[in-house]
Image (cartoon, helix red, strand yellow):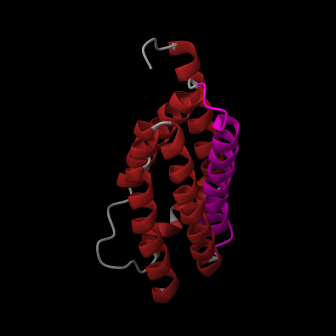
Amino acid sequence: MKNINFKKLFIYIFITLLIGVIPSIFVYNNIDKYELLNKPLLSPPSIIFPIVWTIIYIILGISIYRIMGTDNNRKNEAKLIYFIQLIINALWTPIFFGLNEYFLAFLWIIMLILLVITMIIIFFKIDKISAYLNIPYLFWLLFASYLNFGIFVLN
């Protein structure tokens, strides 16, 4: 990727952030309940979550921008899995915070992890850097699944 199209890059980042943030708006009032839950060891302060997710969504936007900038004939397949996992990601929030269905949310995040692994594999075949950019996302989801399961067990 030699020439950066900043308009397209911004659009991919913006769409990713928008899809990621919109569900939080609808369950914002329930997010305060999180503070009252019994949480597993290693649970970070609540302020960490929006910071980490914002960084992850920006990196996700960069990775799909890179994929779509290639001439690879699998880029539409990569785009499809990208948006499927992003929507699955966004739906976790109302399941966990809106419905308070902690076990269902845990199963949902496991499905998301499998989708992200699939996405990384597809991205790797198209643009290795795009795949590597998503490794922190995968690790964060693994950590989030630990937290989710811990909350299910403790509550």
Q: Which portion, as a residue range, is magenta?
A: 71-100
**Total numbered labels placed on residues in the image:** 0
Q: Quadrant of residue 80?
A: top right
Q: Left or right? Give the position of 47 relative to 100.
A: left
Question: How far from the left and from the top, in percent, is residue 126?
Answer: 53, 38
Q: Residue at x 48, y 80 (%)?
A: 149
Residue shown at 39%/60% (left/top)? 139
Which residue is painted at 53% across and 22% down in the image?
9
Q: Position of residue 109 (x, y in %)?
A: 57, 67
Residue lying at 57% horizontally and 75% vertically, measured from the top left: 106
- Nearest to the observer: residue 136 or residue 66: 66
Asked whether, in this view, residue 13 is left or right of residue 74, the answer is left
Q: Main secondary structure of the magenta part?
A: helix
Is residue 110 a member of the stretch shown in magenta? Answer: no
- Residue 47 visible in the picture: no
Locate residue 100: give its quadrant.
Answer: bottom right
Residue 43 position in % (x across, y down): 33, 69
Task: Reply above or below: 150 against 58.
Answer: below
Q: Position of residue 46 (x, y in %)?
A: 39, 58
